[in-house]
Amino acid sequence: MHGLINRAIQSFVCATYGQPCWLRVTEAAGLGFAEFEAMLLYDDAMTAKVLDALCADLNRPRAEILEDLGTYLVSHPNMEDLRRLLRFGGVTYVEFLHSLDDLSDRARLAVSDLRLPILELREVSPAEYHLHCYPGLPGYSSVMVGVLRAIADDYGALAMLSHEGSQGDAEVITIVLIESAFAEGRHFDLGARKS
Amino acid sequence: MMQTSELSALLDTLCPMFVMVDDQGRIVNAGPTLQKLRPGHPMRGRGFLDVFELVRPRTVTTIAGLLSLAGGKVHLKFHDEPRTALTGLIAPLPKGNGAIINLSFGISILDAVRDYALTSADFSGTDLAIELLYLVEAKTAAMEASRSLNLRLQGAMLAAEEQAVTDMLTGLKNRRAMDVVLGHLISGNSVFALMHLDLDFFKSVNDRLGHAAGDFVLQQAARIMEEETRNEDTVARIGGDEFVIIFKGLVDESVLTDIAGRLISRLCQPMMFQGAPCKISASIGTALSTQFGTPDAAELLNAADQALYEAKRQGRSRHCLYSALAASGLKPASSQ
């Protein structure tokens, strides 16, 4: 598993539940260390053990925690860089949804060994979309539900999301767009630069 | 033939940074993104060379010259601030009716997007500008993550070196390990002898036969020192050709003199390196912890060092006891 993914989980747990929780989780998972390096690769089993330990520690289902992780990735100030990269996907929420087809290619363009599952958006009507998440990363569709919900807020769109279960080998997320310009949304300045 | 206005509308969509000039070099129309760079100063009606300075090719200074560069690439700058750099491609209109000049930011895109608060709507759908901006941000973030990993690895490496107690070349203890052993012996009130051994003529082996020979000699010398001492003794390489041997519980000067004699005689035997004899020898100074009321590591090392200096002074390949210096009145009366 790519270190970026493990690091994202670590960052989410520390920011949401605190460092002590993360230390308990890594201890219970038997990692032998408490800090993932973003640019190294780790055995997939480690990530699974961390998530199992986290579910046990919080006594919450995995899908729910992963949805929160997705929300964290877009909305937490720690993750501003990632939010910006996602916002490059489009000027509107609908444009962003369509850009998800390119998400795994975009990720690979940034970090060549980061492989994300293929996503495919199918437009059912201008107000309803189905996002097919293909296999490759267990729990990815749960994370995507959180990401899509948070980024809808970011664009100021009002959308209803539900995880519809599987269709063939893909898991399907239904996105019902109620209002594409519901609220102001957060500003995205193309030329913003860190000082 | 298409009307100028129809053509302009088409170009607004396809290349929103175009300029249409007439045969006199007057701007007939400018694309919306280009015009956005100078809000409040309509470009239409102004001379192209009054708005833009031609940077390259330098030989061209007139409109006629510019229009003759059909299909050629030009480098421009705004005359006024901010003097954003632009590249342009010139396509003449039929029948000498002027030209279309399509402009682009080129490498100045990063500054331009910030200076002019451009958005993705300002670029045509096929323009790679947005992808370029995405890539710059993504690569910067990835580079930062790599850099922070590199810094942490460097820190870990320094910490590991800091904690290392072995001399890599000889496998003996290093200076840090020797300091630790000395500290333990002194704080535990143990009695011990400290020998300071220096290889003679080592530098000449190194100079004459090269570093590989020098390394070989150091390894052989280390082996001899380990063979001539007990397991509980500590042999450390503390400098290029300097060694310290600590004999725990041994303060009998006649035994120490015997050991020193054996060390010197073995180290004086030529060592064969790739068929070439390497000849060195050794000088040794020895001090005892019992020669000091409250021994201190630096003081003991200094005493052994003084004895070593005396051994060298007497003509090398010798062993000298610190107590002999004391008896002959050669040393400062700092000890008991």
Image: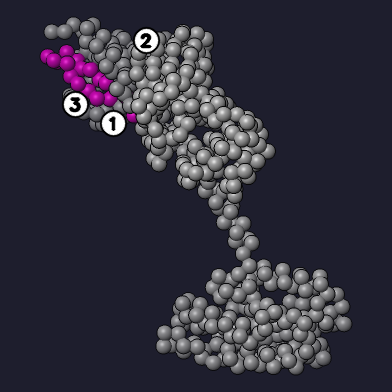
Q: Secondary structure at mark 1?
A: strand
Q: Position of residue B228 (x, y in %)?
A: 63, 87
Quadrant location of the C terminus of chain A?
top right
Q: Position of residue A53 (x, y in %)?
A: 59, 38
Q: CA distance from mark 2 to mark 3?
A: 43 Å
Magenta residue span? B88-107
Query: Is A129 covered by the magenta stretch?
Result: no
Query: Is B104 covered by the magenta stretch?
Result: yes
Q: Secondary structure at mark 3?
A: loop
**Between A158 and B164, which is closer to the camera in this rendering?**
A158
Q: CA distance from mark 3 to mark 1?
A: 14 Å
**Can you identify the residue that label 1 sits on?**
B56
Pointer 2: residues within 10 angstroms few (<14), some, or many (20+)?
A: few
Whether tag 2 and tag 3 are in contact, CB under 8 A, the answer is no
Identified at 49% across, 11% down, the residue is: A158
**Between B35 and B128, which is closer to the camera in this rendering?**
B128
Q: Amino acid at mark 1?
A: Arg
**Can you identify the residue that label 2 sits on?**
A126
**Can you identify the residue that label 3 sits on?**
B71
Q: Secondary structure at mark 2?
A: loop
